[in-house]
């Protein structure tokens, strides 16, 4: 039955030609879309790199910010402040987040577990500026701005991230390991601390690192809770501390080109920190998943 | 379920002291932590309402439709900011949703397996850029580019439309919408990509066997199968877009009125709070900003619940879809 007519059907002509052309067009369009996303990333990171690197110096990193409008200083106070704010927030959010995850995966009945997951997702969807208003009302109104207020706001933003990642990682721990522990009569708390958590350590670390990377660049809640600070390098969280994101925000609003250059340099420090943390976290996650055979 | 618990009192009494204390202690502590999460979300709703109360009792529900923000006469309304939030988010999603679908098609159907992971990681990295840096870039790079190139071109071609009338400006609704597009695209993409990956291979192969081209297979198998996931992902992106305060405050210009032209400066609810809360004078300005926050909170909660319901009802019955950072992996 293979006449010349059959052959003609398979030639790229008429309707088939139109269909193939449309197919190619979609391929080209989606490739362009992917390239566009990558290009935007490279353009943004490239802008920060090219405009920030010039102002980056030992002096910039080790000198505190000058008086308002004075751009001869650096960002040492903001670097120290960000480290303290994020560290205090992490000390609050990571243990609590981990415990929430342990509760939902080890203890909670199904219905309650789902309800807590839902609450965490809601919390994750609360705009960070609202978290700022909340902490402002709770700790700043009638009082004054402080590093603690800033850290509490950051901790609230971290909590759902830590808890949700930890939940996902803990459910990946092989049931056979837990069953073996149960069969040996190991108490639940021992099993959790000695078997579940160590097995999941890599993934848990990933969640913690990602949450740190996320809040290190968080600006909105700090504007409301921790943005009016004294000069110089401060380390006491009971008074307001400078931070890199707030420095970038305030410098970006300034009309002076020198302030903009400083903002780019600070942005370079922040973006390098955040991206490196993300890459490290991914590496841990990939290793941990492999270990658990997922 | 209760494999670890000992219900037999004799056996329980034989356990050593540490185990008898340890189990309830860990359960109690972790239960307490879970309770903290619940208390925080309730606390946020209560506290924001509390702070907004003077404005709520003064302006009532009419606040939503009042087109005025005047610290001198102490008359405040949310209309300009609701308008700004809706317009910027809608434009952002108009760009971000098709872009995300196209990127996901590339990543799941077209990309050679060697570039698939690197490209997916780079797209995810876009979501990791702090918003204040995107805002800085918006002020100093994107803004001038909009003013000098994009907006004059739009005006030249489509200037007869009222939304493209007026003078080009570096700051305004359109610039803010583009920044939001950059922020939401990676979020939507990461969910859509995952949904596309759950499309059963035999359905796709079936389409190919019937002679479909790749695009016909995508249009008739992948897209219908993923419809719920795509809608849910887009709404999750919407949640992110309406809540973004800093980057929008940096590039939208801060005008407190409604303007039809997208080139014009304006403000959104989140951006207005970020811009004015710290210095807000007047007895009613801070409460009015908190009132804006309350409206925003209601928007955000509705959007999040809707997105989750849609995604869960859809194709992803067994996969958790959350916009947590874990998803980006």
Image (tube, helix red, strand yellow):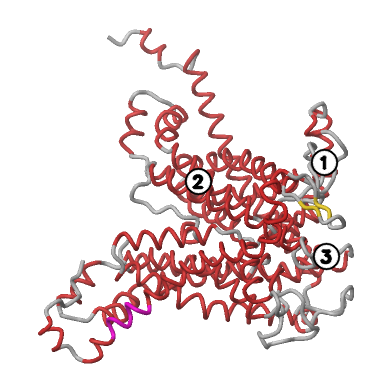
Quarter of the figure with the N terminus of chain A: top left
Residue stretch in magenta: B22-29
Q: Position of residue A61 (x, y in %)?
A: 75, 80
Q: CA distance from mark 1 to mark 2?
A: 32 Å
Nearer to us: label 1 or label 2: 2
Callout count: 3
Q: CA distance from mark 1 to mark 3?
A: 22 Å
Q: Which residue is mark 2?
A: B233
Same subunit, tags 3 and 2: no
Of B117 and A215, nearer the camera is A215
- Name the element at disc 1: helix
Can you see residue A218?
no
Image quarter for residue B289? Answer: bottom right
Can you see residue B272?
yes
Mark 2 closeness class: few <14, some 14–19, many ≥20 residues within 10 Å: many
Mark 3 closeness class: few <14, some 14–19, many ≥20 residues within 10 Å: many
Disc 1: host chain: B
Nearer to us: label 3 or label 2: 2
- Does the segment drawn in magenta span residue B249? no
Can you say whether B212 is above or below A131 in the image?
A: above
- Name the element at disc 2: helix
Residue located 80% across and 30% down the image = B162
Of B301 and B198, nearer the camera is B301
- Name the element at disc 3: helix
Quarter of the figure with the C terminus of chain A: bottom left
Q: CA distance from mark 3 to mark 2?
A: 36 Å
Q: Which residue is mark 1?
A: B149
**Left or right of B98, for residue A186:** left
Tell me the tag on residue A260: 3
Can you say whether B94 is above or below A187 in the image?
A: above
Q: Position of residue A147 (x, y in %)?
A: 66, 80
- Does the segment drawn in magenta span residue B26? yes
């Amino acid at each position: 039955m293979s006449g010349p007519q059959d052959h003609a059907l398979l030639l790229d002509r008429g309707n088939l030609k139109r269909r193939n052309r449309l197919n190619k067009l979609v391929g080209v369009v989606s490739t362009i879309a992917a390239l566009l996303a990558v290009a935007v990333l490279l353009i943004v990171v490239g802008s920060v790199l090219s405009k920030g690197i010039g102002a980056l110096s030992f002096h910039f990193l080790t000198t505190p910010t000058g008086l308002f409008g004075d751009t001869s200083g650096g960002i040492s106070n903001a670097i120290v402040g960000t480290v303290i704010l994020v560290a205090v927030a992490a000390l609050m959010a990571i243990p609590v987040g981990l415990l929430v995850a342990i509760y939902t995966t080890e203890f909670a009945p199904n219905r309650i577990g789902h309800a807590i997951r839902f609450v965490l997702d809601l919390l994750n969807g609360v705009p960070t500026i609202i978290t700022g208003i909340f902490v402002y009302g709770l700790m700043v109104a009638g009082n004054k701005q402080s590093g603690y207020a800033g850290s509490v706001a950051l901790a609230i933003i971290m909590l759902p991230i830590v808890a949700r990642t930890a939940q996902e990682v803990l459910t990946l721990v092989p049931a056979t390991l837990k069953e073996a522990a149960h069969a040996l009569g190991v108490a639940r708390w021992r099993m959790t601390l000695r078997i579940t958590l160590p097995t999941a350590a890599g993934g848990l670390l990933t969640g913690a690192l990602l949450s740190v990377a996320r809040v290190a660049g968080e600006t909105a809640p700090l504007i409301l809770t921790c943005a009016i600070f004294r000069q110089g390098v401060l380390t006491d969280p009971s008074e307001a501390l400078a931070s890199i994101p707030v420095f970038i925000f305030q410098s970006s609003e300034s009309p002076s080109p020198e302030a903009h250059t400083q903002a780019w340099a600070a942005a370079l420090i922040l973006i390098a920190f955040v991206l490196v943390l993300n890459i490290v976290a991914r590496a841990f996650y990939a290793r941990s998943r492999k270990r658990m055979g997922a | 379920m209760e494999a670890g618990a000992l219900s037999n009192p004799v056996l329980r009494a034989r356990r050593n002291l540490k185990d008898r204390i340890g189990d309830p202690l860990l359960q109690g502590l972790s239960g307490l932590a879970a309770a903290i999460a619940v208390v925080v979300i309730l606390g946020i709703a209560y506290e924001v309402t509390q702070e907004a109360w003077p404005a709520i009792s003064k302006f009532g529900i009419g606040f939503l439709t009042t087109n005025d923000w005047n610290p001198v006469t102490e008359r405040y309304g949310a209309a300009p900011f609701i308008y700004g939030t809706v317009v910027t988010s809608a434009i952002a999603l108009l760009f971000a949703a098709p872009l995300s679908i196209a990127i996901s098609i590339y990543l799941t159907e077209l990309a050679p397996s060697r570039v698939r992971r690197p490209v997916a990681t780079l797209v995810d990295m876009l979501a990791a850029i702090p918003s204040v840096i995107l805002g800085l870039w918006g002020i100093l790079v994107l803004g001038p580019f909009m003013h000098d190139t994009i907006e004059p071109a739009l005006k030249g071609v489509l200037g007869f439309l009222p939304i493209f009338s007026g003078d080009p400006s570096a700051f305004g609704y359109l610039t803010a919408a583009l920044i939001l597009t950059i922020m939401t695209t990676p979020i939507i993409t990461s969910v859509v990509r995952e949904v596309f990956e759950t499309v059963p291979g035999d359905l796709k192969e079936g389409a190919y066997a019937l002679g479909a081209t790749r695009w016909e297979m995508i249009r008739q198998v992948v897209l219908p199968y993923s419809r719920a996931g795509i809608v849910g992902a887009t709404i999750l992106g919407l949640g992110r877009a309406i809540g973004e305060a800093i980057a929008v405050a940096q590039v939208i210009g801060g005008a407190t009125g409604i303007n039809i032209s997208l080139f014009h400066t304006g403000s959104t609810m989140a951006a207005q709070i970020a811009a004015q809360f710290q210095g807000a004078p007047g007895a009613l300005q801070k409460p009015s900003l908190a009132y804006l926050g309350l409206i925003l909170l209601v928007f955000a909660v509705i959007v999040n619940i809707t997105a989750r319901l849609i995604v869960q009802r859809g194709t992803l019955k067994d996969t958790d879809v959350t916009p947590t950072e874990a998803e980006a992996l």
